[in-house]
Amino acid sequence: MPEPAHQDAAAADADLPELPRRRDRRRDGSDWTGTIPVIEANNGSDDAPPRPAPVRSSSWAQAAEAADERFGNPATGTTPVIQQAPSSEVPAARQETPEQPAARPTAPRQPDGPPSSSVSDAGTEPTRGAVPPQPSRATRSGLRAASDSPAPDFISSPGLFVREQKPRPVGGLRGALYKLTGGSLNLGPSAKQREEDELARRISRQLQGSYNTAVLSLKGGIGKTSTTVGVGLTLAEYRGDPPCAIDANPDSGDLVERALGEGIYQQQTPRTISDLLRNVDSIDSLTALARYMHHAGRLHLIAGEQDPEVSDSLTAEEYLRIRKLISGYYSVALTDCGTGVTHNAMSGILQSADNLIIAAGYAVSGAKRARSTLHWLADHGYEDLARNAVVVITDKDEVSSRVDKDAIEDHLSGICRKLIAVPHDRGVADGDLVTLDALRPETRRAYREIAAAIVDGYV
């Protein structure tokens, strides 16, 4: 009578070494690693190199690191280092010679059939699930070299993933072609447009801190206040933060009237620099300061005192208090100083100024007084302001042809940082409201050049 099957299994187990069972490990409190003993098959050859022992680790991170070293990490692109046995240790059936390379035919895979078989090197029966050929040594070296070089990413090299867009042309033939073709034909901006874009970039630069430019002259009626308004409106047009203009003219200045118009200013509640001084200590926000300001678009203005008995009473200390208050809310300020450099507030204005605009004219007297202003500054401790000043010559009266304009420009340009000429424009010469829309293109460009020049002096 044949013995039961379980008795045969028990007898077979008796010949195998004793293996601890899962329940035995848990019962005696030992750790269970979940690793099943690996039985090595030598395929009938005692010379085959032993297989590496299974990875045993007490943590997942260590096990993953050990696996990456053996098998490579596809996430990082690393490849395993494959140890190639010497040719003497390779079985004879696997050795190949250049004269007779081993044939390795592969059967094409059928679309709907089972996986194809591969023929072994020794010419034996095909085996299912054959291992694909390994990459060559040169291929593996190239992969390792590629993995060592840093790959571009969106954070460090964003420009590698986006094509640079050519600027859009505005106006002229280039702009017309761009519109007619719906943007498919883009010849880029012209040289003139590139110059305008560069001026806009210089004007709109971000500033760290608050800066003040004083506009002064020794002679009245040569474009000082109109330059303050025109440059202030230009700064407001291009800068992200609004500028502020302060009327510190002791002779009943008309800065706000030139920016708003006489009629509009008279209709508003009169708020002057004297009102601001009386309440300067109670102002702790931009909202509170706005009650004493006038607004010409994005240009914010502080009106001068109109009463002649009060307008000349502004002292240097009072101006510095106002300047300190303004510096907490505005990055750019313009101060219309009036004529002369010796009135009470002038020392405080020059002390807090970062650069100057010297107003001049093409008349002989206007040019001589501009030069005298620069010499006075250099002789009274303001040599840096004189050397970095911007001289603005406004052609208001269309002087006769007997005046050599080029000679006047050459005479003044050598003693200042920059000289800019404002052409004759009825929107400036009338002495009334100054608006950018009513000015000639050449006049507006001159104001852009002045605005860019003063911001250059800040950075």
Image (cartoon, rainbow, N blue to C red):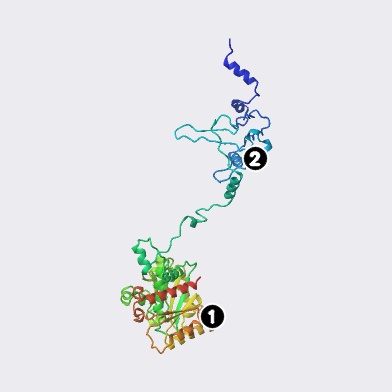
User: Which amino acid is tagged 2?
Assistant: Gln
Q: 158 left or right of 59?
A: left
Residue contact between numbered discs 1 and 2, judged by CB atoms under 8 Å: no
- Sequence order check, earlier mark of 1 and 2: 2
Does 20 appear above or below 179? above
| Residue to which mark 2 is pinned | 84
| Residue shown at the point (53%, 78%) measured from the top left | 384
The foreground one among 8 and 409 is 8
Tag 2, which secondary structure? loop
| Residue shown at the point (48%, 31%) measured from the top left | 114
The foreground one among 19 and 346 is 19
Image spot of residue 353 (x, y percent) = 49, 75
Residue 333 is at least partly visible in this image: yes
The foreground one among 447 and 112 is 112
Q: Quadrant of residue 49?
A: top right
Tag 1, which secondary structure? helix
> Could you say which disc has been placed on residue 383 in the image?
1
Residue 321 is at least partly visible in this image: no
User: Mark 1 against mark 2, which lies toward the viewer?
Assistant: 2
The quadrant the N terminus occupies is top right
| Residue shown at the point (54%, 44%) measured from the top left | 75
Image spot of residue 444 (x, y percent) = 39, 75
